Image (tube, rainbow, N blue to C red):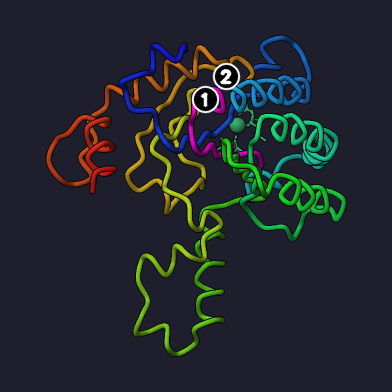
Amino acid sequence: MSAAETSGRQLPRHIAIIMDGNGRWAKQRGLPRTAGHQEGVKRTREIIEECGRLGVEILTLYVFSTENWRRPPEEVSFLMGLLEDSLMDEVERMHQRGARVRFLGLREGLSPQLAAKMRAAEEKTAGNTGLNVNLAINYGGRVELVEALRRAVEEHGEDLKAGFDESLLEKYLFTAGQPDPDLVIRTSGEQRISNFLLWQIAYAELYFTPVLWPDFDRTELAKAIAEYQRRRRRFGGVESVASERAESKENI
Ligand code: IPE
Ligand code: IPE
Ligand code: MG
């Protein structure tokens, strides 16, 4: 998508993607599932770069869910190894482009080596002001909510009863301080949320495509954004075009 194509139409500020279909992509080619995960990393890189180029503010990528531990141990260790091996290279690329990396999810359960790389990635890119990339690793929407509530109780104790509201809860989410996703994309034809950002997607536009993640390139991203730009977002109110609403919000 060229800048000219998007100009005058509202880009989603925050895009969240359920990157699904690596295994099926590999199976279709008679390859092991691991080959699909390797190819998926390349698309992840391409989509991060494209979002940065387009001027999207936040990109949240679902990398590994709290339920993905149920996979065969060989696949889990392959995925963890792939993450550990590729993370710093990918972070370096993002850093060169001024992107800031954060991780959503529970650090417990991850290897100390991976956890250390995640910390290093966040520290290295902390001062960057370009695209914000959230990588959801060992992430689950339910665990996020339970954890948020647990921490809120821990910090506020009995006082919580009086002051508990949406904005207080949001302070304890992994995405604290960030606007909610405007657009959620899921590849591979599955039409479900699979425990992704349960709280944050209350009013997100959902886009499902049969394209498998290793085939989801910048042209496919452009199609998703174009579809988003045709949607009418109402937020429970009266009809307005996505762009009009976002513009009028900025004028408040
Ligand atoms: C997405 O692809 C990658 C992860 C969930 C880690 P899948 O591995 O789920 O691929 P399919 O859904 O089996 O094709
Ligand atoms: C969702 O994909 C999780 C990620 C993309 C990381 P899954 O392949 O795990 O989802 P289900 O099991 O089909 O719902
Ligand atoms: Mg899947």
Specify whether tag 2 is near ligand 1 (CB below 8 Å). Answer: yes
Q: Is residue 21 above or below residue 218?
A: below
Does 55 sit left or right of 205 as displayed?
A: right
Q: Position of residue 152 (x, y in %)?
A: 51, 75
Q: Is residue 125 above or below residue 222?
A: below
Q: Position of residue 247 (x, y in %)?
A: 26, 36
The residue wearing badge 1 is 187
**In the image, is residue 57 part of the stretch drawn in magenta?**
yes
Image quarter for residue 34? top right
Q: Earlier in the sequence, mark 1 or mark 2?
A: 1
Q: Which mark is residue 212?
A: 2
Specify whether tag 1 is near ligand 1 (CB below 8 Å). Answer: no
In this view of the protein, which residue sits in the foreground, 118 or 77? Answer: 118
The residues colored magenta run 52-64
Image quarter for residue 222? top left
Q: Quadrant of ligand 2?
A: top right
